[in-house]
Structures are given as C-alpha cells and as structure tokens.
Amino acid sequence: MIDLSTHCAGIRSPNPFWLASAPPANSGAQVQRAFDAGWGGAVWKTLGQPIQNVSSRFGALHVGGRRGVGFNNIELITDRPLEVNFKEIYETKRKYPKHAVIVSLMVETREEWKEIIKRSIDAGADGLELNFGCPHGMCERGMGSAVGQEPRVNQEITSWAVEYSTVPVLVKLTPNVSDIVPHGLAAQRGGAHGVSLINTIKSIIGVDIDRFIPEPRVGLQSSNGGYCGAAVKPIALHMAASLARHPEFKIPISGIGGICNWRDAVEFILLGSTSVQVCTEVMLKGYRIVEDMIEGLTEYMRSHNFETIDQMVGKAVPAYSDWGDLDMNYETVAKINAESCIGCNLCMVACDDGAHQCIHPNPNGTRVPVIDESECVGCNLCQIVCPVESCITMERVDNGYAPTTWNQFVNEGKTLRPKKGAH
C-alpha cells in the first residue's frame, strides 16, 4: 500500500506537499481551503514586526505563449496584525490536527525572536521556519538574506531559535550566494532540525520600454525583487542536491523552487528533499493543483515499487558527481526515426549553426535528414529542438575505449583519445 505521509525534520504531514510561505498561506481561511483541497502542510506567510507593502508588487516573465514561466515579487512579510495571525493559526491547527502548520518568522533582536517563537508555539505551530532568504525590503533592514548570506549570523540566530523552541526549527536559505553548502552547514551547527531551500533569487523581471521603468512599477520607480516560478527549478535542484550529497550535512531538506507538478516534486525528493513546498504555481492556478500532484506521485510510487516517501528520498543523489568524475569515453550519437520525422529540419539548422555540423539534407531528396555519425559528438541539441516526441534518440556506441575520467587522467597520466571529428 502506498503511504504518502512524511516526517520532515520531526514535522509530520499526510503527504509531502506543503504551501510555501507566501500569499497562498497568508490567512487561516486560505490555509484551511488548501487543506480541504488536499495539501499536507502549510508554511504560514512570514510573521514579524508590522510592515507596509507597495503597489504594484508582482511581475512575470512570459515565454513562447506560456504565461508566468518566471515570477517576480517585491512584496514583504505579512501586513496583517500578529494577533490576527496567531488567532487564525490556532483555529486552523485545532480544525486540522493532522496537517502540518509551520510558522515562518523574521525579526531582529534576540528578545523579539524569543517572544515571537513562544507566541507561535502557543498558537499551535508544529514547526518554525526562520526566513533567512528574502532578497528585498527586509534585507535592507538587516533581516532576510542579510542573515542568510552570513554563515556566522545564520548560525547564531538559529541557535537562539533552537534554544527557545520546543518544536522543530527549519532554516530557509537564500540562493543569493556563490555556494549554498557553508550556509546549510551553518544552520546545522546552529542546531536546526532541517533546512528549506530555495528562497527567491534577486532579480529584475523586465523593463517597461515605453515608460523606461523596470517592472513591477511603483509610480515612476521600481526595485529588484525575488524571482521564482518554473524557471528557477534547475537552480533549486542544484542547491538542494549540493547539500544532500555533502558528507557533513546530515539534516532533512524541504525543497522549494519551480515545483509545478508531481514530476517536479519527484525530482526534488530523489535529490534529497523530504517535503516539497509550492508557491507560484498555486498563485497562478489555485489550490486544486495538489489533486494531480497527489495522484501523480501515488502512481509513480506504485510503478517504481516505492511504498513510502522515505524510500525515495535521495535516490538520485549518488549519481550526482563532479564533472571530473564523469566518463569522458562514454559516447552517444543521434538517431532519427524516419517514420516519425516530419521534415521540419529544425535539427539540421540547430546542428549547423549551434553545434557540430553533422546533420545534412538527405541526398535521396527525402524529408528525413541524415546524420554523419563520425562527426556527431552526442551533444543532444537536435533532440532538444525536435518537436516530435522520441523522433530523435541518443544511442550509446562502443568506441573501443575503456572508461576514464578527467581526474584519472590527471592523477595517473592517462592519454586522452583523439577528439572526434578532428582533422
């Protein structure tokens, strides 16, 4: 029997799908509707000292007819009174005792952390998430990514929270760093029970080319904001996996960044995440997207003989290695299925102008291009641009060379084989 329940850093939920700390988790009414739709948990929109937001505050990147591939915001933490938030957290947890309610927090001083942690736990929080990632507005006040970019400060404030908390503490990490590992390790040294990543990426989403003002526009000005949405998934996967594979990192991960469907969630879980958090896709399509996520994940687990989420967590991590450990003598070439090829020649144009000039018009005059396998380096650009599913495949060839890596070559003085296509 498939069991979707998860136990992330000591926080239990009926499934791994959580709302991320953002507008979809801004109020009790919203979180309760989300739980009714099937979400397993929610990270409440960040609580802290009162702020005032600006208008407008969202911007989006549209690509090839798809709207909102990338999303940008200059919104700050909750602008609702703390008393109202705590009352709604209490009511929500009382009504949904089996769902995970995690409260995101961001304040400045040690005493403020102590007070807001106590109030959050008294309201019924199952866990806390320390927001060390916000890249705009709050960082100018010495919070958010200003904390997340300094491992020493991260560790110190995390240790305060762990000291004052009787529930698990997650640290939400900023991606606006050159290497995520020192920051994850700092949270771990501070006693965090787990980390959440990634928060949004510092960005400018675009420019109004008629008004000459960046977006989103606030009067006659704008500012950098936080980038999220489907387009950030590769960055988020890399950072989550970088922590998951590090031998000194031992605490759970809640994966965030570009999760739009069950496949995205599976990728995060296979690269080390115990739970996954979703924001932008909910903002664009509503809470009911979780129904397909639950169904898809369940069927995936059944088809791959997984009974629990724990059996999946980190399954792909061992296959993530440094470039220097890749087999340089592993070779593939492109093959075109003549029956499904529509003769669009996109592969030929891409290869000729952007790759290795190994795809040519068929000398027989038919629609199907031919591949000069002696020149093909297996880059798979042709497969990427092909509009027909499985028309172009990359197939391994036996070149007679034994496996070798760059690191072996350097350490043992091995000889590189001649470069393919060299003249």
Image (cartoon, rainbow, N blue to C red):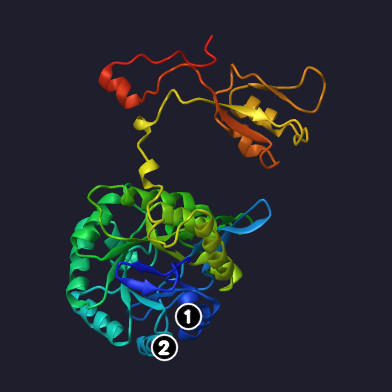
> Residue 174, image x and y in percent?
35, 58
Q: Secondary structure at mark 2?
A: helix
Q: Earlier in the sequence, mark 2 or mark 1?
A: 1
How busy is the neighbourhood of tag 2: few (under 14 within 10 Å), some, or many (20 plus)?
some
Residue closest to the eye, 33 or 108: 33
Note whether residue 260 is visible.
no
> Residue 187, image x and y in percent?
24, 60
Q: Is residue 108 above or below residue 135?
A: below
Q: Is residue 224 above or below residue 57?
A: above
The image quarter in which residue 130 lies: bottom left
**Residue that mark 1 sits on:** 31
What residue is drawn where x is 59% and y is 73%? 288
How busy is the neighbourhood of tag 1: few (under 14 within 10 Å), some, or many (20 plus)?
many
The image quarter in which residue 172 lies: bottom left
Q: Do callouts 2 and 1 mark residues in contact (Cβ within 8 Å)?
A: yes
What residue is drawn where x is 48% and y is 65%? 2
What residue is drawn where x is 34% and y is 48%? 242
Q: Which amino acid does the dot numbered 2 rest on? A: Glu
**Residue that mark 2 sits on:** 88
Note whether residue 60 is visible.
yes
* Image position of 344 (left or right of 226): right
